[in-house]
Amino acid sequence: MAAGLACAGLVHGPAAMAQGGAPAASTSTPPAQLRAYRISPGDELEVYVWGEDKLQRDIKVLPDGTFSFPLVGQVNANNKLPSEVEQEITRGLRSQFRDAVPQVTVSVKTPVGVQFSVAGKVRSPGAFATGRYVNVLEALALAGGPGDFADLGNVRILRKSGNGLTVIKVRLTDIMKGNPSDRDLAGLPQLESGDTVVVP
């Protein structure tokens, strides 16, 4: 029940329904761009410590990205890979075992998916959730495309980073005119859960 196997279908599976019932874009992502699923608030996890039935839990990640686990306390799972959470729980259990800590397995049982918002001059602004990672252009498509007078040369991605905010500038002018360069396409950033795309 390795975590990598448990999460593989989340990347390759079809995109989930966007808010409002609109299906997410079905364009396939090249294998080189596939990313392992990172845990989001609201995800339901299965945590298992081998040989310790009392430490088997189905846990829902809280809105702040944390959850509580016996003998360990608060665990921060937000935007982490299941393998990273396994390591954190293992470290927390070390003082409880005389010998080596039994193997810890974390798998995503029920994912909420990648959640992001699109705001500004788009035809259908709002919050969206997909079962896979999407780039900024796909996010714009989910929001109905750019509205009239949208400034596609100054699109911004707002990303929470610790206690601060990171702003990623994106130029989509040439791509939306149907004349993208290889550099334009290669430079399209993928969204992370919690991102907000702003189209001025």
Image (tube, helix red, strand yellow):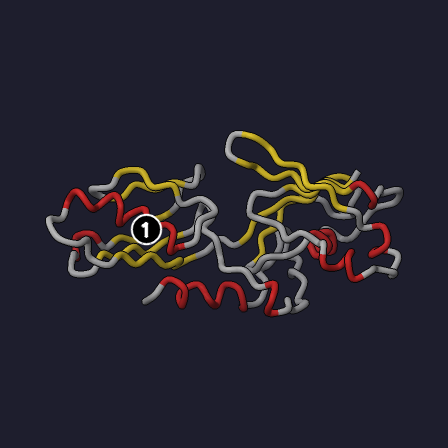
Picture coordinates of residue 3 (x, y %)?
37, 62
Could you tell me which residue is drawn at 49 percent across and 57 percent down? 37
Q: Residue at x 65, y 38 (%)?
A: 158
Nearest the viewer among 189 and 115 is: 189
3 relative to 161, above or below: below
Q: Nearer the viewer, residue 197 or 62?
A: 197
Q: How many marks?
A: 1
Image quarter of the N terminus? bottom left
Query: Which residue is label 1 attached to?
Result: 87
Furthest residue toward top:
163
Dividing the image into 4 quarters, which one contains the C terminus?
top right
Question: In the image, is 11 to the left or to the right of 70?
Answer: right
Where is residue 23, by image quadrant? bottom right
Image coords of residue 168 (percent x, y) = 68, 41
189 vs 21, nearest the viewer: 189
Q: Nearer the viewer, residue 108 or 172?
A: 172
In the image, taking residue 109 as reference, residue 143 lies left or right, namely right
| Above or below, comparing residue 134 to residue 69 in the picture | below
The residue sitting at 62% across, 50% down in the picture is 191
Question: Residue at 66% of width from left, 67% of height from top?
Answer: 26
Q: At which x and y percent is residue 171? A: 79, 47
Residue 8 x %, y %: 46, 67
Judge left or right: residue 155 versus residue 158: right
User: Disc 1 marks which amino acid?
Assistant: Gln
Q: Neighbour class for label 1 at 10 Å: few (<14), some, many (≥20)?
A: some
Please tell me whether mark 1 sits on a helix, a strand or a loop. Answer: helix
Residue 13 to residue 113: above or below? below
